[in-house]
Image (tube, rainbow, N blue to C red):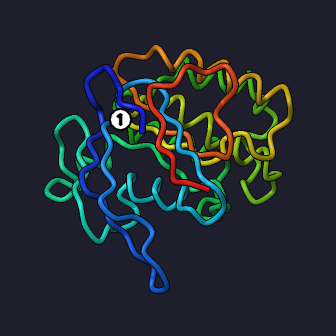
Amino acid sequence: MNTPTSPAILEVKDLGFCYPERELFAGLSAAISSGVTFVSGGDGRGKTTLLRLLAGELAADAGKLSINGVSLQTHAKDYRQQVFWTEPRTDAFDQLTPAHYLDLQRNAYAGFDDGMLSTCVNGLALAPELNKQLFMLSTGSKRKVWLAAAFASGAALTLLDMPFAALDKASIRFVLALLEDTAAHPTRAFVVADYAPPAGVPLAGVINLGD
């Protein structure tokens, strides 16, 4: 992993996780600073699993996680309030409209930025979709909803799993531009898991899980 030069927002110490059939992580440590950190790895190397562990959605077998000094192990609620994570393949919100889902995120995050939300709704062409139920939307449109919430959340740690999958070219360019801006943000850390790094985006660090 590349070592960040600015103070860490997320501290990962000796993280371990096993599936019944194999060990996935052992002794994984990282200091994730503000800006964009890239998680690389081939199929089955644990990119999504790592994001779920960092989100506190999946319990690790070993290790410690803390955001801005708040420990997941001892203050789980306070830790999770600083994390934005929505599994992009989830159907948990399918009966909601995007507008309702975004309202839930607005209420969940003290730093939610309605100006950024408006920018994302316009930039991702989401306005016509806001009052449809999520199950009615295409895969790409649902992912745009999660991305709009992610950037608007203001969360200290934002986790993005393959953020460009199923997006049209204009939306990919828009998300890349947002990530370029995020790279200079002093208090937010974005962790992007994908097969290739986001083109043109300066990286604060890289976690390579191998091929």
Where is residue 130? Give x, y as percent. 72, 39
Is 6 displayed left or right of 180 in the figure? left
On-image quarter of the N terminus: top left
Query: In which quadrant of the rendered view does residue 202 lie?
Result: top right
| Depicted 103 relative to depicted 121: above or below | below
Question: What residue is shown at x 56% (from left), y 62% (from top)?
Answer: 45
Comparing 153 with 162, the one in front is 162
Residue found 43% across the figure and 17% down from its top: 185
Where's the C terminus, which quadrant? bottom right
Q: Is residue 112 left or right of residue 97?
A: left
Give neighbour class at mark 1: few <14, some 14-19, many 20+ (Cα, 10 Å).
many
- Look at mark 1 in the image and give the residue it sits on: 32
Residue placed at 23% from the left, 45% from the top?
Answer: 66
User: In the picture shown, does residue 195 fall above or below 24?
Assistant: above
- The amino acid at mark 1 is Ile
On the image, the x and y values in percent for residue 120 come to: 66, 25
What is the x, y in percent for residue 17?
37, 69
Q: How many numbered marks, from 0 up?
A: 1
Q: Indicate the secondary structure of the residue bearing disc 1.
A: strand
